[in-house]
Image (spheres, rainbow, N blue to C red):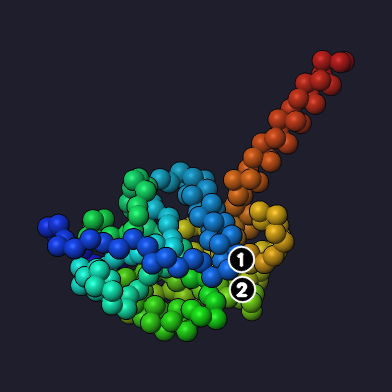
Amino acid sequence: MSQPAFSALAPLPFDLVYSDGEPLESGWHVYQFHLLLDLIPQAMAEQGRSDFYAGGNMFVYYSVEQARDVARGRPYFRGPDVFWVDGVSRTPLRKAWVAWEEGGRLPDVIVELLSPSTQKIDRTTKRDLYARIFRTPEYFLCEPEARKLEGLRLVGTAYQPMIPNGQGRFWSQQLGAFLGPWHGVYEGYEADWIRLFRSDGTLVPTSAERAEAEVARLRALLEEQNRTGSD
């Protein structure tokens, strides 16, 4: 609960902007985005948690002044690629994250999927904003071409590098899981991805992997029943 408090505000005299019309950078970025948003709720479910919101590729409004600038078409901050907020309701689905409508809450975990066109701002302007204004405890940067994942933890008013374990994974105190590299097939594409791992090092499964495991379990159960019935 490190973010600053916001007071209740009257309706704004302008409309919030919800989309800048810019797609994610590449096919890898699109699939990695969906992979993380598939895994985070599963990791929370395994911990018996429902008091969180996971989102991304949407505006994060942290001040009325920022919202006014966006409405006027001035240079603006779009928002993190993927973010997670602790201690809030999962519903309703938001078109944007509006801090003053969320009790002042701002992201507790941010993951940026770097690209040649974004990595400079992700490492400078955004990093400073997340540290000073958002007060986001954990910031992860994934550079796909270099196959590199970095973890940063907020110490005071600045980020300090996290130390990965022997598998190159970073422990997220906020998520209660490791983030780390994984090479495999997701949605039919073999590539290097960022996955979530449990504290014992096992993978947090995707929706498809959970479904496959359930089918395998039921098939094994049926085969056992058939063997038992034939004895």
Q: Quick one: SS at disc 2?
A: loop
Decide: few, some or many residues near mark 2? Use Cα within 10 Å; few <14, some 14-19, many ≥20.
Answer: some
Question: Residue drawn 72% across and 61% down?
Answer: 190
Q: Is residue 93 left or right of residue 179?
A: left
Q: Give the image quarter of residue 202.
A: bottom right
As drawn, 108 above or below 72: above
Q: Are marks 1 and 2 in contact (CB under 8 Å)?
A: yes
Look at mark 2 in the image and give the residue it sits on.
Answer: 144
Residue 156 horizontal/vertical position (percent): 33, 78
How far is disc 1 from disc 2 in space, using C-alphas? 8 Å
Question: Residue drawn 70% across and 59% down?
Answer: 189
Residue 124 horizontal/vertical position (percent): 42, 84
Residue 94 horizontal/vertical position (percent): 35, 52
- Is there any visible trace of residue 217 in the rendered image? yes
Q: Is residue 123 left or right of residue 226?
A: left
Q: Amino acid at mark 1?
A: Trp
Residue 38 horizontal/vertical position (percent): 54, 52
Question: Residue drawn 21% across and 70% down?
Answer: 68
- All told, the count of numbered labels is 2
Decide: few, some or many residues near mark 1? Use Cα within 10 Å; few <14, some 14-19, many ≥20.
Answer: some
Quadrant containing the N terminus is: bottom left
Quadrant containing the C terminus is: top right
- In the picture, the disc for residue 48 is none
- In the picture, the disc for residue 28 is 1
Question: Residue drawn 60% across and 64% down?
Answer: 27
Q: Give the image quarter of residue 199.
A: bottom right
Q: Amino acid at mark 2?
A: Pro
